[in-house]
Image (cartoon, helix red, strand yellow):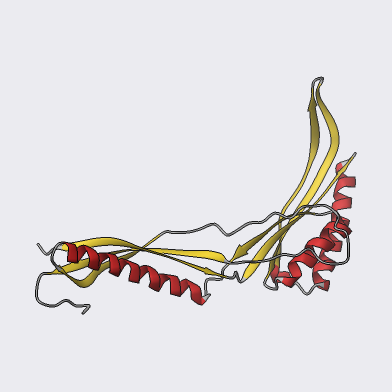
Amino acid sequence: MSATVKVRGDAFVRTEPDEATLWITLTALEDSPSAALRDVSARANALVAMLDRLGITKGDRSTTGVSVHEEFDHGPDGRRSLGQRAATRVSVRLVDHELIGRLIEQAVEELAARIDGPRWQIAPENPARLDVAREAAADAQRKARAYAEGVGARLGPPLELSEVDSHHSPMLARAAARPLSGGEPMPVDPGEQEIAASIHVTFALDHGPSSADD
């Protein structure tokens, strides 16, 4: 049976994200479900107009939830109804980072919105994803060569490769849902996000005078 060595290669690359997602929630508490829903609907239509004004296309926004329910307060004397709560949640995808602060400011000040995000993401087609894959493969080869030298062999060709799931959750920041003062939009810095890649590689070990990677 031919000798082999199986190693894991790992690599990490940092790069600026390509896009971000914001979640905008509009909510109202009223005496009746219809009144709460009317309030939220009016502000949801205003949000649509705001997104149009900012040049955010319909393909980059999606209603992710609508709810109407009775809300209660639980105290020492038991449960007390506070009224009917209506809410709607919209996700917005943004590729222009400068728009994020403006959208947060306007949605909070004009619509009393709650903001979650931004969640930064690196696009699948970003060249950094291929760069980190190459680095992971190179790391595996370096480790395998060191193991081979340690047992007096030389590294042969790769026999099997399999990618390891190294998914990292996108970075999430949370913006405060409170009125902003001044005329400047909230500063939002995308920074850099880490991409990770890992690979298992099985190499043949060659005890002859030369090896395939020389």
* Position of residue 55 in the picture relative to residue 129 (left or right): right
Q: Residue at x 10, y 70 (%)?
A: 207
* Position of residue 208 in the picture relative to residue 114 (left or right): left
Residue pushed farthest top? Answer: 77
Screen quadrant of the N terminus: bottom left
- Above or below residue 81? Residue 186 is below
Screen quadrant of the C terminus: bottom left
Residue pushed farthest bottom? Answer: 214
- Above or below residue 200? Residue 26 is above
The reply to whether residue 202 is in sight is no
Q: Residue at x 29, y 68 (%)?
A: 142
Q: Position of residue 140 (x, y in %)?
A: 31, 66
Q: Residue at x 60, y 59 (%)?
A: 171
Q: Position of residue 19 (x, y in %)?
A: 64, 69
Location of residue 103 (image quadrant): bottom right
The reply to whether residue 162 is in sight is yes
Count of all numbered marks drawn on residues in the image: 0
- Above or below residue 57? Residue 78 is above
Q: Position of residue 39 (x, y in %)?
A: 89, 51
Location of residue 173 (image quadrant): bottom right
* Position of residue 53 in the picture relative to residue 166 (left or right): right
In-front residue for pair 70/130: 130
Q: Position of residue 57 (x, y in %)?
A: 74, 73
